[in-house]
Image (tube, rainbow, N blue to C red):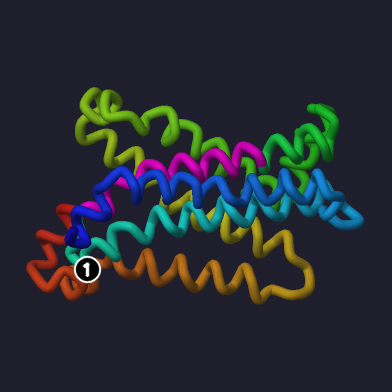
Amino acid sequence: MDVQGFLSGRAFKLGLFVLCLFPLARLVALAASGGLGANPIEFITRSTGTWTLVGLLLTLAVTPLRRLTGWTSLARHRRMLGLFAFFYASLHFVTYIWLDQFFDLASVARDIVKRPFITLGFAAFILLIPLALTSTQAMMRRLGRRWQQLHRLVYGIAVLGVLHYLWLVKLDLSQPLIYGAVLALLLGARLPWVAGMLQGGNPRRAVGRSG
């Protein structure tokens, strides 16, 4: 079987689905074995936040990788990756509002207003919601060109996510800076002349197929 066939097959899709569930399974296993450390809430919050960022970056990596390799079948899995990013973002938010704040909405509102990194994280989560709700084929057909315009919000969401992490960390900035560098590369790959180089064709054609 060729690469394109493998990437579009059920086995690859199932494997990717299981792989995306692994961080959650790991958290459950650690919780069951008492392996979440001295501050379990912080561990869960950091883990779900990290995997939200990873999911966003993987989603953004699909288009440059597709142009570079010619493996068009990769685009079939972009929606799954995006929805898993939203899934872990939702767990991240639920952990904060439930385990950290115990549904004290007044306290949550104060945090959103007074703590900039929470403001950015909350904004990113809110912007993710319409993308998740419109991720179906039916919504793509219904919205037409507006669907692509709406889903370009993912670029800004990823920037907000990296800044959220950067402003959260007080000492070692290495990890958020690594995420920021990867995001910069993925966004830079969408510049017309870079996209044209990756695709080995006309930059205008590459921009027309951006995602």
- Determine which residue is flagged by label 1: 69
Residue occupying the far front of the picture:
1
Q: Is residue 80 magenta?
A: yes
Residue occupying the far right of the picture:
38
Q: In the rendered image, which quarter is residue 191 located in?
A: bottom left
The part of the chain drawn in magenta is 73-91
In the rendered image of this protein, does residue 209 appear above or below residue 171? Answer: above
Q: How crowded is mark 1: few (under 14 residues within 10 Å), some or many (20 or more)?
A: few
- x and y percentages locating residue 44 in the rendered image: 75, 49
- x and y percentages locating residue 122 in the rendered image: 63, 41
- x and y percentages locating residue 82 in the rendered image: 43, 44
Magenta segment's dominant SS is helix
Task: Name the residue located 78 percent from the left edge and 35 percent from the top edge.
Answer: 108
Q: In the rendered image, which quarter is residue 199 located in?
A: bottom left
Q: Left or right: where does residue 122 sit relative to residue 40?
A: left
Q: Left or right: where does residue 140 sit relative to residue 46?
A: left
Task: Name the residue located 78 percent from the left edge and 54 percent from the top edge.
Answer: 43
- In this orientation, which residue lies closer to the viewer: 6 or 134? 6
Q: Which amino acid does label 1 sit on?
A: Thr
Q: Left or right: where does residue 145 sit relative to residue 162?
A: left
- In this orientation, which residue lies closer to the viewer: 58 or 155? 58
